[in-house]
Image: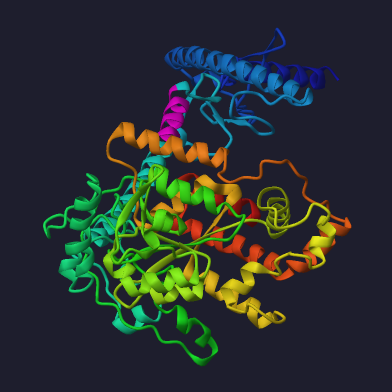
């Protein structure tokens, strides 16, 4: 037992010596701060091989180990600080995540960063060099977006937006320039596209100018020379009219009138050479138009040798229109006034001054007077600017191929016109007795049965048919510029434009002419002096008058459509704009 105890003690001494000499720390102390606590972690590389002799290591090795331990301690201290900072960031991120708020730094969430073997911290993902310009790093490895990079991105977006706007603007300007260039090209071409003589004879437009105006000297055309050479000089000698155009070839004729015919809106005069007119031909279904072939179609160009023709509908503003033509526009008319004071038997044509107006000494409002005007060569003389008559088909004899008539008409609602005629005959003319009521009148005691339809279709007796109504519609559409009493100023503008008339060139005279038209529009001529009421719808008088004017009412409604259609060509600028707006509303 003593020997056994001694052996055990010796073994313990040997083990104690080995532990003190051969065991050396491999890493050293590592300080980590977690929540303010300092912990020591030492890793030992044990040389417990059961061998002794740990004293063989020299003191120099111990010094080196000490130096290494010091360096490791410094590095571990830095890494510990970095790790602590990243741990704090991670704790902050987790707390913000729990509260529902997103941290404003980019690396966030589970495994948002990792510690490399050298102790540095990287954000999640290994390839971050492509974000080096947009982010900057911190000591913890968390990368933040740079303020300058955000500003650059906004500027880049703004630049691209401006470039897109400039491109769209450039395309729009280019399209407008191309459109203008095309318009200038076609408008500036020498001459205009003529159609063949057959198409002109069929009623198509023979010449189309950009301003829808056709003027010229008749001497250059080879026809209608009487109008330029004889008539204009006769006008100057007989009337002393200073406004009559010069008859020399160098001065283009102002149009069909001798009193200053040209564009109503003051446009410039142009001289065009027109193809010679040809006789119109019609198919069997339109043979009823053959007697009116020397009335030009609405689509035909205005020739200097043409004469305006006013188809006078009784009690439809006819007297007002004649005063506008004579007193306001100073144009020469042929009507019943010209044969007053015994001039109905004059052997030659002449122009007379009567009550501030001028008239040719022929009466075209009666059939005998029309025949006398034909015998004296009224249309070829060119003395009359406007022929006034209610006999359309009889007046056709006044015109020929080279001296055609350009017809226009002024319309009024048929029921209003019939009522006005009744009171005019009772109060003004006196050919109806006071005892005749308007109901008696409408039952056939003096009322006119569908006057417009009968005089247009030339069906004066017998019952009217649908074919008569269709004929009247075609004649009205093809041969007449349509106007209305309740739209008189617009109508006057269209008539002036259609016939090539214009206001005086002097500003004072022009203003007087315009005021004259406005005054007559507000205070019509030959209006009924006594006030009366239009029969109300549903009354017996209204029903009877409606029956007597049923075809005229349909024709009047159709004339409204024609009036709207003619706005595009002859209407004022204001009326054209209003029509476009109305069509847009209907289309929308």
**Residue 273, position as x, y percentages in the image:** 21, 68
Residue drawn at 47 percent across, 52 percent down: 571
The image quadrant of residue 101 is: top right
Name the side, left or right, on which 247 lies relative to 85: left
**Residue 124, position as x, y percentages in the image:** 59, 35
Residue 153 in sight here:
yes
Quadrant of the snapshot with the N terminus: top right
Residue drawn at 42 percent across, 38 percent down: 514
Name the side, left or right, on which 60 lies relative to 458: left
**Predominant SS of the magenta segment:** helix
- Is 230 situated above or below 359? below
The image quadrant of residue 553 is: bottom right
**Between 568 and 40, which is closer to the camera in this rendering?**
568
- Is 207 situated above or below 287? above
Name the side, left or right, on which 417 lies relative to 123: right
Residue 461 falls within the magenta-colored stretch: no
Residue drawn at 66 percent across, 45 percent down: 528
Residue drawn at 57 percent across, 43 percent down: 524
**Between 233 and 372, which is closer to the camera in this rendering?**
372
- Is 454 situated above or below 252? below
**Residue 287, position as x, y percentages in the image:** 50, 87
Q: How is the image coloured?
A: rainbow
- Is 190 situated above or below 374? above
Residue 204 in sight here:
no
Looking at the rendered structure, the number of numbered marks drawn on it comes to 0
Report the span colored magenta: 148-159
């Amino acid at each position: 037992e003593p020997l056994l105890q001694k052996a055990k003690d010796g073994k313990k001494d040997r083990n104690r010596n080995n532990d003190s000499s051969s065991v050396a720390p491999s890493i050293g102390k590592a300080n980590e701060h977690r929540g303010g606590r300092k912990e020591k972690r030492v890793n030992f590389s044990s040389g417990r091989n059961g061998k002794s002799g740990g004293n063989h290591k020299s003191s120099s090795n111990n010094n080196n180990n000490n130096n290494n331990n010091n360096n490791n301690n410094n590095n571990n201290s830095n890494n510990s600080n970095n790790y602590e900072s990243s741990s704090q960031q991670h704790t902050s991120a987790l707390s913000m995540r729990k509260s529902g708020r997103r941290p404003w730094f980019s690396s966030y969430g589970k495994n948002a960063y990792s510690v490399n073997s050298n102790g540095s911290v990287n954000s999640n993902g290994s390839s971050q060099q492509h974000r080096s310009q947009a982010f900057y790093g911190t000591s913890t490895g968390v990368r933040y977006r740079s303020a300058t990079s955000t500003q650059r991105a906004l500027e880049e977006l703004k630049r691209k937006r401006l470039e897109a706007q400039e491109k769209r603007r450039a395309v729009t300007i280019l399209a407008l320039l191309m459109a203008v260039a095309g318009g200038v090209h076609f408008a500036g071409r020498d001459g205009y596209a003529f159609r063949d003589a057959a198409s002109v004879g069929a009623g198509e437009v023979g010449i189309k100018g950009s301003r829808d105006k056709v003027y010229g000297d008749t001497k250059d055309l080879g026809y209608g020379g009487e109008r330029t050479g004889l008539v204009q000089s006769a006008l100057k000698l007989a009337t002393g009219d200073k406004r009559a155009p010069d008859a020399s070839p160098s001065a283009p004729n102002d149009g069909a009138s001798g009193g200053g015919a040209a564009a109503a809106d003051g446009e410039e005069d142009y001289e065009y050479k027109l193809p010679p007119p040809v006789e119109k031909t019609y198919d069997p279904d339109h043979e009823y138009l053959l007697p009116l072939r020397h009335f030009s179609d609405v689509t035909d160009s205005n020739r200097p040798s043409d004469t305006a023709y006013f188809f006078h509908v009784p009690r439809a503003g006819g007297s007002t229109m004649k005063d506008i033509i004579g007193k306001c526009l100073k144009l020469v008319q042929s009507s019943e006034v010209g044969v007053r004071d015994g001039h109905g038997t004059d052997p030659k044509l002449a122009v007379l001054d009567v009550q501030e107006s001028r008239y040719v000494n022929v009466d075209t409002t009666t059939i005998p007077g029309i025949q006398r005007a034909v015998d004296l060569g009224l249309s070829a003389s060119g003395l009359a600017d406007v022929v006034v008559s209610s006999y359309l088909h009889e007046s056709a004899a006044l015109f020929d191929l080279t001296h055609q008539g350009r017809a226009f008409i002024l319309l009024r609602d048929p029921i209003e016109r019939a009522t006005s005629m009744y009171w005019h005959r009772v109060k003004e003319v006196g050919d109806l007795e006071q005892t005749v009521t308007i109901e008696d009148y409408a039952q056939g005691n003096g009322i006119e049965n569908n006057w417009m339809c009968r005089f247009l279709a030339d069906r004066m007796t017998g019952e009217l048919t649908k074919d008569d109504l269709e004929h009247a519609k075609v004649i009205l559409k093809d041969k007449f510029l349509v106007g209305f009493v309740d739209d008189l100023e617009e109508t006057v503008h269209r008539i002036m434009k259609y016939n090539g008339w214009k206001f005086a060139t002097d500003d004072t005279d022009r203003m007087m002419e315009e005021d004259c038209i406005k005054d007559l529009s507000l205070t019509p001529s030959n209006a009924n002096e006594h006030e009366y009421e239009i029969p109300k719808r549903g009354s017996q008088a209204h029903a009877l008058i409606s029956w007597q004017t049923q075809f005229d009412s349909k024709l009047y409604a159709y004339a409204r459509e024609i009036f709207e259609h003619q706005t595009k060509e002859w209407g004022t600028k204001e009326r054209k704009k209003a029509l476009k707006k109305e069509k847009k509303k209907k289309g929308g």
